[in-house]
Image (cartoon, grey):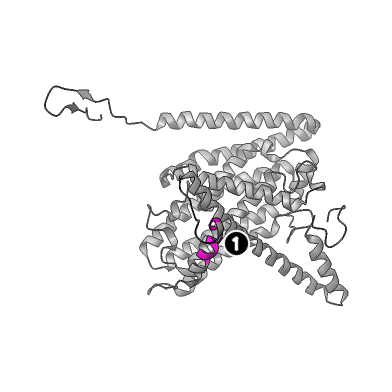
Amino acid sequence: MSPFLAEWWDLRDLGNLVGAILEWISERGAPDWVTYVLSGIVGIVAVLLWAILSQLAFIWIERRVLGRMQVRLGPNRVGPWGILQPLADALKVLAKEMVTPRNADRVLYWLAPILVVVPAILVLAVFPFSPGMVVADLNVGVLYIVAVTSTATIAVFMAGWSSSNKYSLFGAMRSVAMLISYEVVQVLALLAVPVFTGSMRLGDVVAWQDNYNAWLVFLQPLGLLAFIIASAVEVNRSPSDIAEAESEIVAGYHTEYGGIRWGMFQLAEYVAGFAVAATIVTLWLGGWTLWGLEEWVPGWLIFLAKLYGTFFLFIWMRGTLPRIRIDQLMGFAWKFLLPLMLLNVLLAGLEKVVWTETGASAGLVLPAFAVLNFALTAALIVGWGAIAGGLSPRMRAKRPLLVREVGGIYYQPLP
């Protein structure tokens, strides 16, 4: 808990209130294990309520923003400015009939939506919203994120296979292929952070950035860029939402799902999006710190402001970038991002060794590393654009030739 906090009602750290409640229970003679279990329950309920309320708010924000980008109004009927439209949609989903296919594996069919939601919620337990606000302060927080999020792939295939629908199975197979490909990129992007900071505890990574006044976005720009691209695939955000696109194989692995079970898949995607944003904020954007502003503004407010701003980036990407083909998506992961992330991990290790062996001051070596990493990232982006442009032939029709014969214009055929 931060040293400047005083009473339980001090809103600069909401952990004060939880601590006061647990202390009151402990003083009444409750065993330690009861206090321990209650602290976990309170934390899980608080995180779950925050995730659901944030999802309802961002559904409205996303639809309004996309409507603005596409020169239309968006939701504007239910409530003032359509602000109650997400609630109406949630009630509609809850009221819909849940139909189970005749030949489906009922156990796995019912279990898949639950197994999709649970990892998305569990991963939120390790993020420190402020110094005293973390449900589980693990010393292997980065490894926990990788381990928990990877289990959703099993649930995706389970949903497609158990539906007894060949289109759902094909969609699940494509989704699993994409998820596994970009999970490798995601893991390597995350690996560079503990290599450079020397700790896998998320609170220690935030403290490292605060101590040196250097966010890792300036020292690991290549890893952050690759993590954003890979995370867009992991949470089915455009331009890589191939798994459930209408123009693809029907609607992906959850074609046969309806009602609340379909809503659980959508809930999992949004909560996973918040988890991705929280990961970016914690590991690359300084967490709850903002160059001393956290002494005056609650750290959890700073964290949420960064998180919501990061999540808005994915909304912006959805409204501006076109969907790409699955072969392009897979090739980009294995042929470009994977080698780059291996190079990024190697570079992070070399920079750490150089810094340790030379004993140079942080004020000298960190700016040099930042300039080097940004220059390398820019060179790789420009180089990839040149290489990709040269490898993909552009078939352009020749200009029409005016002729004197009947018919007016004659187009030469493509070679």
Q: Pick the quarter of the image with the C terminus.
A: top left
Asked if the magenta segment contains residue 179, the reply would be no
Q: Position of residue 281 (x, y in %)?
A: 67, 47
Left or right placement of residue 138 versus residue 61 in this view: right
Left or right placement of residue 389 versus residue 341 in this view: left
Q: Looking at the image, can residue 201 be seen? A: no
Give the residue drawn at x 73%, y 54%: 129
- 143 to 368, vertically: above or below: below
Q: Quadrant of residue 12?
A: bottom right
Camera-nearest residue between 394 and 107: 394
**What residue did someone put label 1 on?**
119
Q: Position of residue 66 (x, y in %)?
A: 50, 48
Give the residue drawn at x 44%, y 59%: 172
What residue range appears in magenta?
81-90
Camera-nearest residue between 28 and 296: 296
Left or right placement of residue 85 versus residue 348 in this view: left
Left or right placement of residue 60 versus residue 22 in this view: left
Kind of residue at badge 1: Pro
Question: For the view shown, which residue lies furthest in the front direction?
Answer: 80
Q: Residues within 10 Å of mark 1 (few under 14, many from 20)?
A: many
Q: Looking at the image, can residue 194 be seen? A: yes
Q: Position of residue 44 (x, y in %)?
A: 69, 65
Q: Quadrant of residue 29?
A: bottom right
**Magenta stretch, overall SS:** helix
